[in-house]
Amino acid sequence: MRIDKYLWCVRYFKTRNIATTACKKGHIKVNGQVAKPSREVYPTDKVELRKNQINYTISILDVPPNRVGAKLVDIYRVDTTPKSAFESQELLKYAKDYYRKKGTGRPTKKDRRNIDDVYRENEEEE
């Protein structure tokens, strides 16, 4: 089975097109080598993929005949991603002291006070 189709079948990507794009960008490696979307995968292959700033590592147990339900995914792969990869993602969320989503408009009065407080604390520390 093609690597892009496999990753779509085991629900790492929502569409095959997204999986194909990830392959073309070089985010997917099979047995340590960057894989093209048409690369065939077999049981016992090791796949590394980068998605949402997390490097996933999976081992292929079997090739599914078509897209499978979320409960059946573990029959076809073993996820060996280290826990530290997920912990670093959590730390990224907390690293931003104050974050406003783009397009939410001007800061409210409360937001402005919070911003001013942060600047005052930085000035006092220096």
Image (cartoon, rainbow, N blue to C red):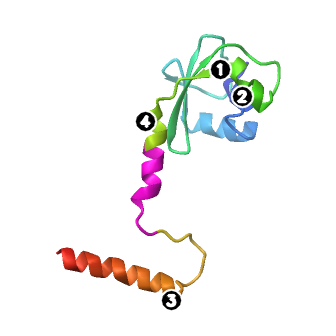
* Marks 3/2: CA–CA distance: 47 Å
What residue type is disc 4 on? Ser
Tag 3: amino acid: Lys
Question: Does 93 sit above or below residue 122?
Answer: above
User: Callout 1: few (<14), some (14-19), or many (20+) C-alpha neighbours within 10 Å?
Assistant: many
In the image, what residue occupies the spot 66% across and 29% down? 37
Q: Quadrant of residue 98?
A: bottom left
Three-letter amino acid code at disc 2?
Val
- Tell me the mark number nearer the camera, choosing from 3 and 1: 3
User: Which residue appears at 56% of the width and 69% of the height?
Assistant: 101
Dot 1 or dot 4, earlier in sequence: 1
Toward the left, the furthest residue is 126
- Relative to 46, does residue 99 appear above or below in the rendering? below
Of 65 and 110, which appears nearest the observer? Answer: 110
- Quadrant of the rendering where the C terminus is positioned: bottom left
The mark nearer the N terminus, 3 or 2, is: 2
- Residue 109: assigned label: 3
In the image, residue 92 above or below residue 56? below
How far apart are labels 2 and 4 at the CA level? 23 Å
Give the quarter of the image for residue 63.
top right
The residue to which callout 4 is attached is 84
Left or right, residue 82 beside residue 70: left
Circle 2 or circle 4, nearest the eye: 4
For residue 28, side relative to residue 115 (left or right):
right
